[in-house]
Amino acid sequence: MGTAMPVRLAVLLAVAALASVAGQAPRLRSGQGAPEWTPEIPRVWDEAALAEWATPVAGLNVRPAHVTAAEYYALPEENLRTYPVYLPGREPAGYAEMIRTTGPKPLIEPVV
């Protein structure tokens, strides 16, 4: 009797997860049998929502300005791997030299 509720909750969560994944099933290209996955990326920069987002600057009674949606979506994408920063004396031996010789690398390397 005591485990019935956690089991029901686990089953409910599993069904909800499967339902959300099922909504992102691959779509078929017209004329081909191979599925092509096309992500649905929501637009996150909303000028109307940002207009009232920040409170006015004290003493000036003006709100901070934001870039327009066109400017935001025209910005170049950053795809660079980042590395941890260690306190002085705590970094692994040769770490700083490895970072200098490695140089910038992409975070995500697409499969071609």
Image (cartoon, helix red, strand yellow):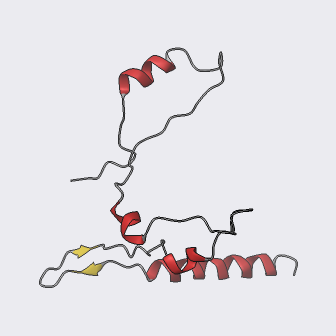
When the figure is inspected, residue 90 is found, relative to residue 52, above or below; the finding is above
Residue at screen point 82% across, 76% down: 3
Q: Residue furthest right?
A: 2
Q: Is residue 42 left or right of residue 105?
A: right
Quarter placement of the N terminus: bottom right
Q: Is residue 89 left or right of residue 102?
A: right
Q: How many marks?
A: 0
Residue 21 vs residue 43, the one in the foreground? 43
Residue at screen point 63% across, 72% down: 53
Q: Is residue 110 left or right of residue 9?
A: left
Residue 79 vs residue 59, the one in the foreground? 59
Q: Residue furthest front?
A: 60
Instruction: Give x and y (percent) for residue 15.
Output: 59, 82
Residue 64 vs residue 48, the one in the foreground? 64
Instruction: Give x and y (percent) for residue 111.
Output: 26, 53
Q: Quadrant of residue 5?
A: bottom right
When the figure is inspected, residue 13 is found, relative to residue 62, above or below; the finding is below
Residue 70 vs residue 42, the one in the foreground? 70
Q: Quadrant of residue 22?
A: bottom left
Instruction: Give x and y (percent) for residue 85.
Output: 58, 30
Q: Quadrant of residue 65?
A: bottom right
Instruction: Give x and y (percent) for residue 67.
Output: 46, 65
Q: Residue furthest left?
A: 31
Residue at screen point 24% across, 75% down: 35
